[in-house]
Amino acid sequence: MRPARLAVLASAMAVLAVGTPAAAASPPSAPVIKKLSASHISQKEALLTARIKPEGLETTYELWIDPCVPPMECMTHLPMARGAIPATTKELTVSAATAVVFDELGLKPDTTYEYGVVADNADGTVEVHKYFTTR
């Protein structure tokens, strides 16, 4: 091969090797709670659901309900579900039925309950809480 052709070929190969740089991965951060909801609400039970993103770090979570009803304000977070999410997991959906935690009497009809989720990793803690009313 002629020297000029070798130089052009070497230049083309260098461009192909460099290519377009890959987008940098986002640095790990505090977890994100994408969703918190209560569904299938009846007189005596409800289904609580949380969707959590660990954001690249191992994350622990707890889905809870406060069994105290107004006017009592005891702020007792009764765990419904808890666990750990591996750093490699993009997103996890956790659901728990109140019937699992409460005895056979269940929740009280026409009563408002507070529920929530807390997620924690090395970069921070996030907590979201809401309310639902039984029928």
Image: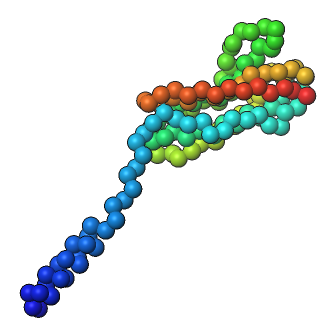
Question: Residue at coordinates 82% horizontally, 21% vertically from top-left?
Answer: 112
Question: Residue at coordinates 76% horizontally, 17% vertically from top-left?
Answer: 67
- Which sits in the foreground, 104 or 135? 135
Residue 12 seen by the camera: yes
The percent position of residue 93, horizontal first and vertical second, equals 64, 42
Residue 99 seen by the camera: no
The percent position of residue 21, horizontal first and vertical second, equals 33, 61
Left or right of 34: which side holds 26? Answer: left
- Which sits in the foreground, 125 or 67? 125
What sort of colour scheme is used for the picture?
Answer: rainbow
- Which sits in the foreground, 44 or 119? 119
Image quadrant where residue 17 sits: bottom left
Left or right of 8: which side holds 53? Answer: right
Left or right of 118: which side holds 76? Answer: right
Q: Quadrant of the C terminus?
A: top right
Instruction: Give the farthest residue toward the bottom.
Output: 1
Question: Residue at coordinates 81% horizontally, 12% vertically from top-left?
Answer: 70
Residue 56 to residue 42: above or below = below
The percent position of residue 101, horizontal first and vertical second, equals 74, 24
Q: Quadrant of the N terminus?
A: bottom left
Residue 20 to residue 62: above or below = below
Q: How many marks?
A: 0
The percent position of residue 32, horizontal first and vertical second, equals 56, 37
Left or right of 22: which side holds 130? Answer: right
Question: Residue at coordinates 40% horizontally, 42% vertically from top-left?
Answer: 27
Instruction: Give the farthest residue toward the left.
Output: 3
